[in-house]
């Protein structure tokens, strides 16, 4: 027999648990930080990144969403990623896909430090056998 999950209820429970964990960190002087990078103005991606920013702010997470121009070069993007990799306020980085065609997505994704790669842990989870 199938079980129907209540997505809104589960989401609310997870967010409440996260708020509590973030509060414990803040009491210790650690403010979790996440940065997203959007290159270009894809409407769906822009909307999605706004939702991520809103959710992070509601949880008490420091957010810095970079919105780069469509004509940002691959080199400029890699420099931004390198800067974020070195920024102690930033604990997690994600790159909103798709990137413009002149930027190698794999090169950009691989430039994110493994310990700050928000999406990498998800990709690794899916790659695990069994």
Image (cartoon, rainbow, N blue to C red):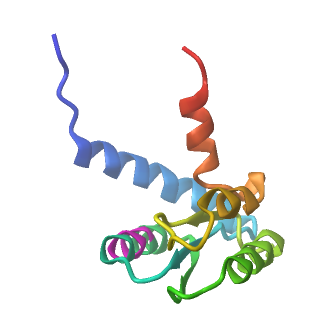
Percent across and percent down for residue 79 are 77, 79
Is 51 one of the magenta-colored residues? yes
| Residue 34 left/right relative to 28 | left
- Quarter location, residue 107: bottom right
**Quick one: quadrant of the N terminus?**
top left
| Residue 9 left/right relative to 116 | left
Q: What span is colored magenta in the figure?
A: 47-52
Residue at the extreme right: 86
Q: Is the magenta stretch mostly helix, strand or loop?
A: helix
Percent across and percent down for residue 103 are 60, 71
Does 130 appear above or below 78? Answer: above
| Residue 76 left/right relative to 47 | right
Percent across and percent down for residue 17 are 47, 49
Measuring 41% from the left and 47% from the top, which residue is drawn there?
A: 14
Does 20 appear above or below 9? Answer: below
Does 130 appear above or below 77? Answer: above
**Quick one: quadrant of the C terminus?**
top right
Measuring 61% from the left and 24% from the top, which residue is drawn there?
A: 128
User: Residue 67 versus residue 70: which sits nearer the camera?
Assistant: 70
Measuring 65% from the left and 59% from the top, which residue is drawn there?
A: 109
Residue at the extreme front: 102
Measuring 69% from the left and 66% from the top, which residue is drawn there?
A: 27
Is 25 one of the magenta-colored residues? no
């Amino acid at each position: 027999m199938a079980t129907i999950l209540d997505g809104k209820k589960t989401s609310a429970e997870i967010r409440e648990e996260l708020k509590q964990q973030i509060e414990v960190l803040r009491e210790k002087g650690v403010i979790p930080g996440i940065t997203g990078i959007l290159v270009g103005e894809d409407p769906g991606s822009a909307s999605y990144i706004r939702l991520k920013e809103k959710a992070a702010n509601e949880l008490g997470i420091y957010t810095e969403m970079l919105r780069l121009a469509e004509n940002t070069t691959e080199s400029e993007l890699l420099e931004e990623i390198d800067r974020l990799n070195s920024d102690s306020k930033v604990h997690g980085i994600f790159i909103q896909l798709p990137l413009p065609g002149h930027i190698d997505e794999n090169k950009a994704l691989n430039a994110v430090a493994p310990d700050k790669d928000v999406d990498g842990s998800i990709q690794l989870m899916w790659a695990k056998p069994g």
